[in-house]
Image (cartoon, rainbow, N blue to C red):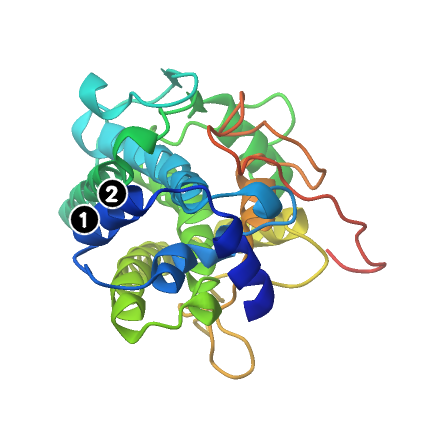
């Protein structure tokens, strides 16, 4: 995380206009907040690859890229259709979505979970697009097909050459959803130390709370189905992508549940933008594309981090 002096420098360098800032504050329902509050949103997105030249709009657009991914995944699974054309345009190259179909849920409760989460993610896209106005980025190319196969292979769920279809059944759907949800929570949580305005902190905390509810639903459903080994393998693979520190935990075992992943103080983990991109690009190397975003994200913040794994870790 960055110190407050760096955050102030980041804000001072921002080229975003005051009118754009007011648009965002109005959309967020927190009109009247100062520059620090607006710029601190999604502070975890201040990764080492783009922060020095990133504007407030660039940080919000980073979040929008991730919301596009989640909204497409969940809405196709729950309703059989992704985002409408009017919700995908903007600055940068607009891409299509590869893969996906409606899931044939056998458990009514899980079908209801999917529909509710899908609606929430759609609302997140609407909110950020409205907040950013003409500065919003277009939906980048999203891969919901070979990306899941690559992730499942890395986790050992399938053997090389096999295919993992997240839409084949509700178990696969839950495992696929698990790839995203904990990442979203750690990304939004990383913003908390950078927000100084209490009113704005409440608004940002509301977004984090929704993502945490989603993660809790998915983890609980996986636990109830006894998918411990599969979920824990995904967690280990995810943690191997984001750097040498342990920032991930599985769901536990048949004898001990771990539905709320926390550190020794009972606090959720944080991820920077670079670490988040390592996961969604499915690579521990510094790259600007890959995995779920084969052409990269749109906007300034788009490059993941490179690191050397410590011996005997992951």
Q: Residue at x 43, y 53 (%)?
A: 227
Identify the residue under disc 1.
Answer: 27
Q: Which of the two residues, 148 or 302, is positioned nearer the viewer here?
A: 302
Would you place residue 89 above or below residue 112 in this image?
Answer: above
- Can see residue 258? no
Quadrant in which the N terminus appears: bottom right
Identify the residue under disc 2.
Answer: 131
Q: Going by the image, does 251 lie left or right of 37?
A: right
- Mark with earlier residue (2, 1): 1
- Counting other residues with Cα less than 10 Å from the Cα at mark 2, is it few (<14), some (14-19), or many (20 or more)? many
- Can see residue 6? yes
Q: Which of the two residues, 4 or 254, is positioned nearer the viewer here?
A: 4
Secondary structure under badge 2? Answer: helix
Q: Which of the two residues, 192 or 117, is positioned nearer the viewer here?
A: 192
Tag count in the figure? Answer: 2
Q: Horizontal and vertical percent for residue 239?
A: 62, 53
Q: Going by the image, does 68 lie left or right of 30?
A: right
Q: Horizontal and vertical percent for residue 285?
A: 72, 38
- Counting other residues with Cα less than 10 Å from the Cα at mark 1, is it few (<14), some (14-19), or many (20 or more)? some
Would you place residue 176 above or below residue 13 in this image?
Answer: above
C-beta proximity under 8 Å, tags 2 and 1? yes
**Marks 2 and 1, how far apart in space?**
5 Å
For residue 113, the mark is: none
Q: Residue at x 25, y 42 (%)?
A: 131
Secondary structure under badge 1? Answer: helix
Q: Horizontal and vertical percent for residue 58?
A: 45, 40
Taking the view exactly as shown, the residue that stands out farthest to the bottom is: 265
**Residue 90, quarter of the rendered image:** top left
Would you place residue 125 above or below residue 56 in this image?
Answer: above
Q: Residue at x 79, y 53 (%)?
A: 309
């Amino acid at each position: 995380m960055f110190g407050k002096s760096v955050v102030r420098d980041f804000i001072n360098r921002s080229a975003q206009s005051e009118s754009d800032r007011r648009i965002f504050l109005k959309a967020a329902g927190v009109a009247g907040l100062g520059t620090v509050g607006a710029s601190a949103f999604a502070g975890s997105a201040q990764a080492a690859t783009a922060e020095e030249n990133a504007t407030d709009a660039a940080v919000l657009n980073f979040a929008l890229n991730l919301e596009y991914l989640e909204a497409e995944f969940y809405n196709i699974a729950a309703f059989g259709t992704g985002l409408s054309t009017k919700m995908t345009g903007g600055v940068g190259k607009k891409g299509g979505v590869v893969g996906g179909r409606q899931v044939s849920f056998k458990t009514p409760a899980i079908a209801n979970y999917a529909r509710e989460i899908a609606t929430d993610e759609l609302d997140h896209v609407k909110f950020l697009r409205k907040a950013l106005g003409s500065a919003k980025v277009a939906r980048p190319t999203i891969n919901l097909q070979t990306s899941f196969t690559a992730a499942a292979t890395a986790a050992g769920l399938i053997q090389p050459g096999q295919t993992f279809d997240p839409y084949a059944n509700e178990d696969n759907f839950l495992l696929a959803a698990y790839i995203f949800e904990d990442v979203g929570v750690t990304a939004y949580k990383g913003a908390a130390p950078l927000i100084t305005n209490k009113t704005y902190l409440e608004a940002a905390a509301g977004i984090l709370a929704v993502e945490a509810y989603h993660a809790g639903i998915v983890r609980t459903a996986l636990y109830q189905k006894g998918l411990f080994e599969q979920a824990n393998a995904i967690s280990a693979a995810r943690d191997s992508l984001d750097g040498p520190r342990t920032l991930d935990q599985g769901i536990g075992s048949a004898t001990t549940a771990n539905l709320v992943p926390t550190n020794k103080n009972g606090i959720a983990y944080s991820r920077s933008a670079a670490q988040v991109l390592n996961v969604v690009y499915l690579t521990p190397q510094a790259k600007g594309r890959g995995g779920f975003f084969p052409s990269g994200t749109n906007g300034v913040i788009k490059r993941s981090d490179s690191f050397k794994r410590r011996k005997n870790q992951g």
